[in-house]
Image (spheres, helix red, strand yellow):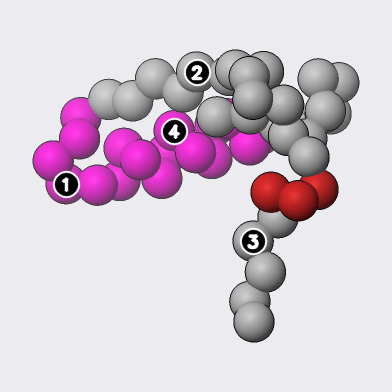
Amino acid sequence: MTLTTPGCPMYAMIMGNVRQKVESIDSIKTAEVELVWESLWTPDRILKNE
């Protein structure tokens, strides 16, 4: 996964929440969340409900 900025102050909480959510799936025992910076995040990646 990626974040909106490299200096995101919420990164630890977001990473922990993602890991917990994935591990809550019955068939998954452990998960490792990998932080990547390619492709860079841009505002056009925001999902819009239309």
The magenta span reads 12-29
Among the two numbered marks 4 and 2 on one chain, the one whose residue lies closer to the N terminus: 4
- Estimate the spatial distance between the alpha carbons at disc 1 and disc 2, rounded to whole Å: 21 Å
Farthest residue in the bottom direction?
50
Depth check, mark 4 against mark 2: the one in front is 2
Among the two numbered marks 1 and 4 on one chain, the one whose residue lies closer to the N terminus: 4
Q: Is residue 20 magenta?
A: yes
Number of numbered discs present? Answer: 4
Viewport quadrant of the N terminus: top right
- Estimate the spatial distance between the alpha carbons at disc 1 and disc 4, rounded to whole Å: 13 Å
Query: Which disc number belongs to residue 19?
Result: 4
Q: Which residue is mark 2?
A: 34
Image-quadrant location for residue 35:
top right
10 Å crowding of disc 2: few (<14), some (14-19), many (20+): few
Among the two numbered marks 4 and 3 on one chain, the one whose residue lies closer to the N terminus: 4
- Estimate the spatial distance between the alpha carbons at disc 4 and disc 2, rounded to whole Å: 10 Å
Give the residue type that dot 1 points to: Asp
